[in-house]
Amino acid sequence: MTPVPDVPAARLSDPVAVRDMADRLNRPDFDRWAARTRATGGCAQPVHLRGHVEYRDKLTGVLLRRFSSGTEPGGTLRVACKTRRASRCPACAETYRADTYQLVRAGLSGGKGVPDTVAEHPAAFVTLTAPSFGPVHTRREKNGKAQPCRPRRDAGTCSHGRPVSCTARHTADDPRLGQPICPDCFDYRAAVLWNAHAPELWRRFTLAVRRQIAKAGGLRVGELRAHLTLSFAKVAEYQRRGLVHFHAVLRLDGPGGPIAPPPAWATYDLLADAVRHAATAVTARTPQSNDVPAHTLTWGEQLDIRPITATGTLTDRAVAGYIAKYATKAAESTGTVDRRIRATDDVNTLPVTDHARRLITACLDLAAVEELAGLRLDQWAHMLGFRGHFSTKSRRYSTTLGRLRADRCAHNEREHHATTGRLPFDDDGVLITTHWNYVGQGLTPGEALLTAALTGRPLPPLDSRHARSPVGRPGPDRR
């Protein structure tokens, strides 16, 4: 018998949630429901599936075993949603963060199929930022003390009559951080276009780094692959002003990837010089139209390049943890929504900051420009124009997320067999057929409280539209 979990008293003030929780506790299948809840890791928006799986002998067609969701609570099988967004499901996002950590660290210190000698390869931690599209409130520190935001003597006002200086000493949680000093002076259209072209800037950046390394080694670009490989892993982070910047690990390998060391002339200093050159050399130009002038987009002036060593101030653990932290976050950290904006949504009533609302409006306005239709800014307005992958890596950097997931599935299968015993037949001689239908997603208010209490996971927000989709109806937009 599963013991009744302790639920925080503060969350028992909702009578609907209390009645729903009591109903779930008093059902005869509560033990099975609790077991499935633990099996999903406390997923805040589990997917509900209805169907069955059959095991048949390949030669005779005899049914050896059958599992049906009809034996599960509610007639559905609940599986984890596996989202990477912490704003939707902290439990599944933590699994994604841990996988990203292992992936990045394996490329710096070895493991997961990568030799330990990779730790001796030159590696740099690089941060590429966006340029300024207008002054914003920021937090400045000196010797651990907050400094005035933007002190200007006799600064006067901008063309819109607003002061261009700010003498406030912002705290870390000040909602004004990242907001423009003057919203009318901030170039929202250019900011959105920069977000949309950031993946292209990154692609051109990596090409420029390779060209500069080849030039330093006295090689043609086409000859570089026979001597050296540039491997990388990066993640995109949103700044509070609504613009992305990239944190990346760049590593020099031999022609076979991490299994071989790079040539002696390929040093960290050479890599750092190539990064500095590429960051200032690459540009991307936006299409020109009658309504929107062409913009030449570049990286921001702030560029950070630091060596990664096993014993220095920036270790493989620190870098992997830093990158993995941002793999579960997206634009919602800047005050926007974490779902796509539909045609039926009223932008003026969205629960977003004024700055995010202006960026979203700029995306929707630019989407109507014929020359910019290929950017699909209306579909990526919730991402403030950014339409790239948040976590990417080169092919030979290290292992893959898919392989890590497969290893975890194999481990869970071994643990399951050790606990319940293996199937009474040889898997190689069995034909497995499955049939599953998606019937809903999410938790009821009472189930959300019980899930948090059973697993120790954070409680999903009471007003989360992603946490309570009724079974049997279409679930939330998971894009």
Image (spheres, rainbow, N blue to C red):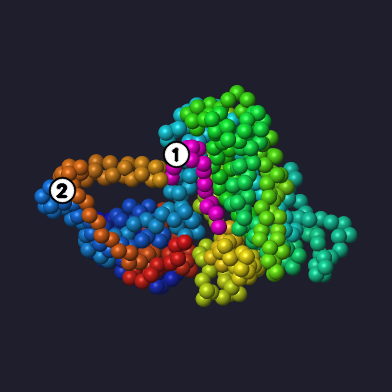
Q: Which residue is found at the position 84% from the left and 65% from the top?
A: 157
Residue 396 drawn at (x, y percent): 49, 37
Mark sitting on residue 433: none
Residue 231 higher or lower than 140, as above or below:
above
The image quarter in which residue 429 lies: top left
Q: Is residue 395 magenta?
A: yes
The image quarter in which residue 182 lies: bottom right
Overall secondary structure of the magenta section? loop
Q: Is residue 158 magenta?
A: no
The image quarter in which residue 288 lies: bottom right
Between label 1 and label 2, give the one nearer the viewer.
Answer: 2
The type of residue carrying mark 1 is Thr
Q: Which residue is found at the position 28% from the left and 61% from the top?
A: 436
The type of residue carrying mark 2 is Lys
Query: In the displayed image of the protein, which residue is found farthest to the right?
Result: 154
Residue 369 drawn at (x, y percent): 63, 69
Which range is magenta?
387-401
Mark sitting on residue 58: 2
Residue 112 higher or lower than 171, as above or below:
above
Q: Which residue is mark 1?
A: 399
Q: Is residue 328 left or right of residue 438?
A: right
Front residue of 15 and 351: 351
Front residue of 475 and 128: 128
Residue 328 higher or lower than 360, as above or below:
above
Q: Is residue 464 left or right of residue 306?
A: left
**Sequence-first disc among 1 and 2:** 2
Residue 73 drawn at (x, y percent): 26, 63
